[in-house]
Amino acid sequence: MQEILTDELNDILENTHPEQIENYLKENHMHLKDDKKGFYYYFKDVLSEKRIKLKDVYSFAGLEESYGSKLITMEKHTRNRDLIITLCIAGHFSLKETNRALKLYGMSELYAKEARDACLIVAINNRMYRLCDIDDLLAQNGFSILTAKHTADE
C-alpha cells in the first residue's frame, strides 16, 4: 500500500466540495488518523495486500484468536509494545509498515539508536519472520526476547 503524504491529501482537499467529503473519507480511510479504526484498517489493509489471514497472524504470534482480534480492533488496548511488534512480524510487515502500525496504535516507532530496537530493525529488514529466530538474535545480544508469554491482562 502506497502511503499518501499529508501534502497530497491537502491538495485533494483543496478541490473537494462538502458534498464530496464522504467519498474522500471512504477512499482515503487508510491514510486518515483515527485512534481506533486507523490501526485496524491499516493492519487489515497490509495483510490483505500480502494475502495473509488474520487468523494466521494470531497463530504465528502465539495468541488466541479472540484476544488477538480484540487487540487489532483495539477493543482491548495493550501497553505492551512487543506484542504489537510481534503481530507485525507475524504479518510479515516491513520496517516502514511496522513503524506506521506502532504509530497508529499510539506507540513509539522502532528507533535505530536504541540497541534492542536496532536488533529488531535488522531482523525485519532481513525478513526474519520466524519469531524464534528473532528471539535467538535478541538473546544472543543480551536483550529480552520478543515473545515472552502474552496474557489478556496486558
Image (cartoon, rainbow, N blue to C red):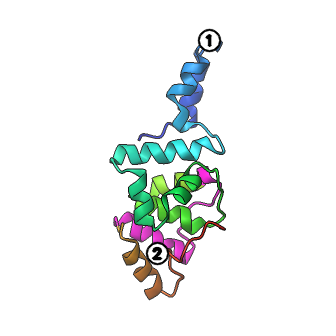
Residue 9 can be seen, yes or no: yes
Eye-nearest disc, 1 or 2: 1
User: Range of the magenta residues?
Assistant: 103-127
Q: Identify residue type, mark 2.
A: Cys
Does 117 appear above or below 58? below
* Secondary structure type for disc 2: helix
**Residue at image mark 2:** 119
Q: Identify residue type, mark 1.
A: Glu
Residue 125 percent location from the top left of the image: 38, 64
- Residue found at x 51% / y 63%: 85
Does 22 appear above or below 58? above
Total tally of numbered discs in the picture? 2
Question: Quick check: 123 left or right of 41?
Answer: left
Judging depth in this view, the residue of 151 and 50 nearest the camera is: 151
* Secondary structure type for disc 1: helix
Does 49 appear above or below 128? above
**Residue at image mark 1:** 19
Residue 25 percent location from the top left of the image: 57, 26
Residue 27 percent location from the top left of the image: 50, 27
Question: Quick check: 125 left or right of 24?
Answer: left
Q: Is residue 125 magenta?
A: yes
Question: Quick check: 54 left or right of 28?
Answer: left
- Residue found at x 41% / y 82%: 136
